[in-house]
Amino acid sequence: MSDNSKRTKVAIIGSGNIGTDLMIKVMRHSRFLEMGAMVGIDPDSDGLARAARLKVPTTHEGVEGLIALPNFDEIEIVFDATSAKAHEQNHARLAPLGKRLIDLTPAAIGPFVVPPVNLEEHLGAQNVNMVTCGGQATIPIVAAVSRVVPVPYAEIVASIASKSAGPGTRANIDEFTETTAHAIETVGGAERGKAVIILNPAEPPLIMRDTVFCLVNAPDEDTHEQIKASVLKMVDDVSAYVPGYRLKQEVQIDAIPQDQPVHTLLAKDNALFPTHRVSVFLEVEGAAHYLPAYAGNLDIMTSAGLQVAERIAQKSQETA
């Protein structure tokens, strides 16, 4: 699609690392989208300066500045890369004006969306939430296991370079764990979910590493092979839009020793006691469009958000 007149105009609120990386992805790689505005609150931010050099309309007056832009009526989709609290205010202003919002904060006003798991279910939602970077990396794996066998408990550990965690990420750490754990259940299909985030201060910075543990009742080898095949298929699905997403080692499925008190992790009314633990070890290397390659945690968020907007725009253009 080379005719820009047919593309869907988008705005990005948040001129920091995530917003700027997303803008570059839209401009370099999008088939259905066109930048309509870059919005910030710091007039001296690199993101706004870069957008201006690229001839993208800008404002440093936040959501009110966006609404005041001459081309505001042309903008159909708004990405929000600010913070959970700021998104609540941005949603309140923009939703009544008919804008579609893609929320890259943990605000979770709209339904959680993880593209290879449930994107098609929520194409009509006015506000969709991209969970968290850890959620985008790990929930597909939980879903891959749960589509083969019930998952009474799933736990994810996301380790990211401390340098890749800006003020917004740090301010939202509590929301990160709560939002991710909830999405492990509602999207991933686990009966009970837990999320842990680690800010790794190592120098030089290490790329994102994610560990997924699922407790399952799967005593037979045939089910183990189905689980492994499902996980491999899901890794392929995610890497289609996040090329740096990959398994760090083979999927492991181990019997749970009888003396392990795993019952403490299960919901009280769970009647199916797990027999095995599925362990999946991942790493996510960023595409380095704007962010460094070690910031895979931010790259997977912008890549997932772009995937959602592309599909929404594609469907809208097909039915127009």
Image (cartoon, helix red, strand yellow):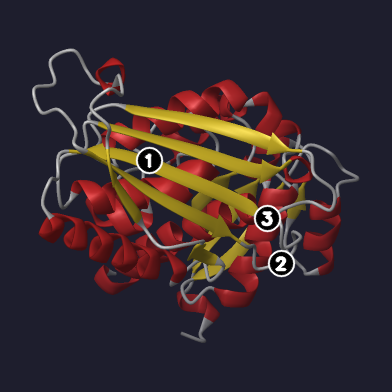
Query: Mark 3 or mark 1, which is nearer the start of the sequence?
Result: 3
Compared to residue 177, the image places residue 117 above or below, namely below
Query: Mark 2 or mark 1, which is nearer the start of the sequence?
Result: 1
Q: Label 2 amino acid?
A: Ala
Residue 313 visible in the current orientation: yes
Picture coordinates of residue 86, whole percent (x, y): 61, 27
Q: Label 1 amino acid?
A: Phe
Instruction: Name the residue: 61% across, 57% down.
Output: 299
Distance from the alpha carbon under mark 1 to that under mark 2: 29 Å
Instruction: Name the residue: 59% across, 67% down.
Output: 26
Compared to residue 162, the image places residue 206 above or below, namely below
Badge 3 element: loop
Residue with the most extreme right position: 44
Q: Write down the residue under mark 2.
A: 288
Please state, as top left, top right, bottom left or bottom right, where the C terminus lies in the image.
Answer: bottom left
Badge 1 element: strand
Picture coordinates of residue 143, whole percent (x, y): 27, 48
Q: Quadrant of residue 116?
A: bottom left
Q: Quadrant of residue 235?
A: bottom left
Q: Label 3 amino acid?
A: Ile
Residue with the most extreme bottom position: 2
Instruction: Name the residue: 19% across, 56% down.
Output: 224
Instruction: Name the residue: 44% across, 33% down.
Output: 180
Q: Is residue 167 left or right of residue 262?
A: right
Q: Is residue 272 left or right of residue 287?
A: left
Q: Write down the residue under mark 3.
A: 207
Q: Write down the residue under mark 1.
A: 213
Disc 1 crowd, CA 10 A, few/some/many (<14, 14-19, 20+) = many
Distance from the alpha carbon under mark 2 to that under mark 3: 12 Å
Q: Nearer the viewer, mark 2 or mark 3?
A: 3
